[in-house]
Image: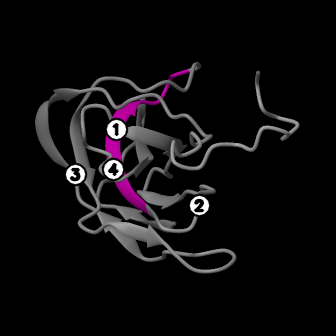
Amino acid sequence: MSGRVGQVVSGNRAIIVYTGVDDCMAPQARILDRTEALGDGEFFAEVFVPCGTKLSLCATIEKKVNPDARSLPTTRYGKLHETLLAEGVGEIEFANLGIALKDGPERTFPTARKAMDRPADRPMRADHPQRTR
């Protein structure tokens, strides 16, 4: 996924793009990736998800000095106006995406977890080597 956030930053501010499953703005959002954009707002994010996953992108302005790369409180954020559907075979690209930011109440996005949980309706077979007993 690539595009531009409609904001320019410098100094101790960074543009962060969050990739979420379904709605990245939901209070308990499932965030898969946290990517720092360039100072001019240009970004590139990559996630690996099962076919049919609905993705959303949110962007924020946060402090740049963040050695733990954890989500920080922000009052400037926005969301891509469309839901992205990861559907097809092989690598799926979404380009020329645009995210506008606006001021709002303070919020902190959930911490990114790269791996998705296995769907409850598709249990791992009993003899699978990675199955925990």
- Left-right relation of 101 to 92: left
The residue labelled by disc 2 is 50
Please name which of the two marks, 1 or 2, marks the residue nearer to the observer. 2
Q: Secondary structure at mark 3?
A: loop
- Pair 4/1: label in front: 1
Disc number lying in front (3 or 4): 4
Q: Nearer the viewer, mark 3 or mark 2?
A: 2
Amino acid residing under circle 4: Cys
Q: CA distance from mark 4 to mark 1?
A: 11 Å
- What residue is disc 1 on? 29
Q: Amino acid at mark 2?
A: Pro
Q: Nearer the viewer, mark 3 or mark 1?
A: 1
Residue type, mark 3 in image: Leu
Which structural element holds mark 2? Answer: loop
Using the numbered discs, state the Cα–Cα distance from disc 3 to disc 4 in whole angstroms.
9 Å
- Which residue corresponds to the image point at 56% horizontal and 68% vertical from the top-left? 51
SS assignment for the magenta stretch, majority: strand
| Whole-number angstrom distance, CA of label 1 to CA of label 2 | 18 Å
Q: CA distance from mark 3 to mark 1?
A: 19 Å
Start and end of the magenta stretch? 54-66
Which residue type carries mark 1?
Ala
Instruction: Write the residue at 41% across / 57% down.
Output: 41
Secondary structure at badge 4 equals strand
> Is residue 61 left or right of 71 when viewed as pictured?
left
10 Å crowding of disc 3: few (<14), some (14-19), many (20+) = some
- Which residue position is annotated with label 3? 101
Would you name the residue on which mark 4 appears? 58
- Residue at 75% x, 44% y: name it: 125
Residue 12: percent from left, percent from top: 42, 29
Residue 39: x %, y % from top left: 45, 50
In the rendered structure, which disc, 4 or 1, sits on the residue that comes first in sequence? 1
Q: Is 130 colored magenta in this rendering?
A: no
